[in-house]
Amino acid sequence: MKKIRFFLIGFVLFVIVGLLLYVSYFKYHEYTSDKKIDDFIARIDKIPKKEILLVKDTYRQSTKQETNFSKKITTKKDFEKWKKEIKKNGKFYNGDCLPKNYLPKVEDCELIYNFVCRLPDKKVEFTYVITGTGYINSKKVIKENFAYPDIPFDYPEE
């Protein structure tokens, strides 16, 4: 009976320690990825720090091959422009109609600066996104819609 109890306690402890290590591993990488993204934003020095509005804090995206951590921001200028556009058109950029008495929130802003830190090499990548329309790869569309269109970005040939 003592052997069974010892085995069960050992097994439960093994599972608990395993889960703690698993959660700690991802929390550590979330923290370091968040710091790496913040350092990247500070290093490019194109968006003033006081202009940054957080749309979605660092979160994990996983596939079988890799794990990424993403952070989505917008700016005060982009948020104001977005609010004016949706009020003028009566609908969001993605085509959905604006609900009556809608109060714009930063979390709903569709003009996004998306930063992704890939786990294997800790490299930070950046893309402009208009939510509902996808990633933007046209200089013209970026310059027309974003307040800070000059962030280093790999533009495809047009």
Image (spheres, rainbow, N blue to C red):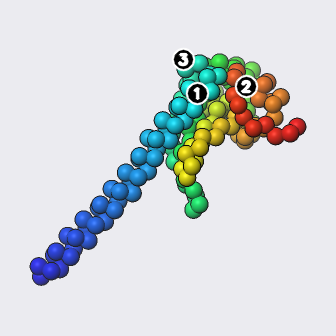
Q: Which residue is mark 1?
A: 43
Residue 121 percent coordinates (x, y): 57, 49
At a point 31% along the width and 65% down the height, the residue shown is 15
> Which numbered disc flags the more N-terminal residue, 3 or 2?
3
* Residue beneath the point at 81% across and 31% down: 139
What's the amino acid at mark 2? Pro
Q: Is residue 51 left or right of residue 9?
A: right
Q: CA distance from mark 2 to mark 1?
A: 16 Å
Instruction: Judge from the rendering whether residue 147 lies leftward or rightward of residue 139; answer left or right.
Output: left
Viewer-side residue, 88 vs 147: 147
Q: Residue at x 55, y 20 (%)?
A: 49
The nearer-to-camera label among 2 and 1 is 1
Q: In the image, is 27 to the left or to the right of 90?
A: left
Residue 50 numbered mark, or none: 3
Residue 55 percent across, percent down from the top left: 56, 32
In this rendering, would 143 be left or right of 105? right
Mark 1: amino acid = Arg
> Which residue is disc 2 drawn over?
149
Secondary-structure class at tag 2:
loop
Residue 90 seen by the camera? no
For residue 141, above or below residue 69: above
